[in-house]
Image (cartoon, rainbow, N blue to C red):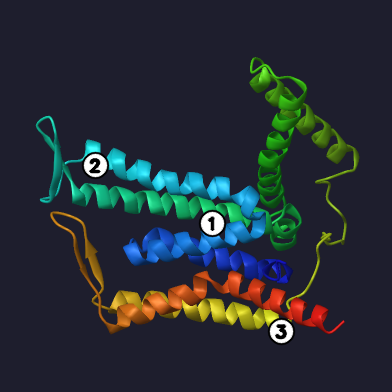
Amino acid sequence: MNGFNKYHPAVIFMYFVAVTVITVFVFDPVLLGIALLSQGAFYLHLKGTSEGISFVGKCLGMVVICGGINALVNHRGVTVLCWMGELPVTAECLFYGCMTGTLLAASLLMFGCCSQIMTSEKILCLFGNRLPHVSLLFSMALRLIPKIRRDYKKIRENHKLQTGILTTLVGLALEDSLEMGTAMRDRGYGKPLKGKRRTSIYARRLQRRDLVLMVCLFLAASMGMGLYACSQTRFLAFPYIEYSRDGMGTGAYFLYVLLFFIPMGINIREELRWKHIVSKI
């Protein structure tokens, strides 16, 4: 059960913007671990364990690959683990590469969760009236990837050969785009309407619970970044690994945990409430 999906699209969009900005601009090992753990758990909850474990495993493998590549091509640092000919392999480069891989993996999981929740209808609901062409282009781009994946599975089921699959996928994508453009033109999309306002098929208003969650998201994100910026929490990878933390940094991590795990908390609460209702039947 996905209770977070029932909130207003503006709330969902605000959450993903907040966690993305914090993850990208606060390059901290503890924060990256929080982001990877929260988004991995959220992705597994959305896709299911059997379907989502493959993608999560690939993201975790990216952490190891980035760490190994950085250790092989970068030789800064003072803690030598081994020698590759005359070039040292240092722990600092290995750790820094793993942090970079964690950032990439958390970002991929984050966008994977966003694509599952922020459907094209919700994007049009948010930006359809103000930015109709941009919102339409973005929603079509989000729709394109799942469609190509479905077409690829159908082609593989009917034709076991690998040759010509790419050409077939491109042809199907172009044909679908042509049909959609023709249908939109015939229905008069983009023509000015005299004295009329654009409507949305996913029109809904902000409710009280949406406003409460938006305030909670804003306070957790702003206070967390403020505490982290004012604290003495620092991380240095070169020339040697150095990490320091104080009480304000610990408070910032606590707020980050609350922020990143808000969707999972809402979903768990909805599931417990549903089980409680079922138990009374």
Q: Is tag 3's residue or tag 2's residue first in the polypeptide sequence? A: 2
Q: Secondary structure at mark 1?
A: helix
- Determine whether, in the image, residue 187 is placed left or right of residue 224: right
Picture quadrant where residue 183 is located: top right
Q: What amino acid type is highlighted by mark number 2?
A: Ala
Screen quadrant of the C terminus: bottom right
Tell whether label 2 touches label 1 (CB within 8 Å). no
Picture quadrant where residue 16 is located: bottom right
Q: Is tag 1's residue or tag 2's residue first in the polypeptide sequence? A: 2
**Vertical placement of residue 253 versus 280, above or below:** above
Q: Secondary structure at mark 3?
A: helix
Q: Badge 3: how crowded within 10 Å, few (<14), some, or many (20+)?
A: few
Tell whether label 1 touches label 3 (CB within 8 Å). no
Q: What amino acid type is highlighted by mark number 1?
A: Met
Q: Is residue 221 visible?
A: no
Nearer the observer, 239 or 210 = 239
- Determine whether, in the image, residue 260 is placed left or right of residue 185: left
**Residue at (70% x, 19% y) in the render:** 160
**Furthest residue in direction right, as rendered:** 187
**Residue at (48% x, 79% y) in the render:** 220
**Vertical placement of residue 239 versus 65, above or below:** below
Point out which mark residue 110 bears.
Answer: 1
Residue 191 lies, in percent from the top left, at 83, 46
Residue 103 lies, in percent from the top left, at 40, 54
Residue 51 lies, in percent from the top left, at 64, 48
Q: What amino acid type is highlighted by mark number 3?
A: Arg
Residue 79 lies, in percent from the top left, at 12, 51
Q: Is residue 133 visible?
A: yes
Point out which mark residue 71 bears.
Answer: 2
Q: Badge 2: how crowded within 10 Å, few (<14), some, or many (20+)?
A: many
Point out which mark residue 208 bears.
Answer: 3
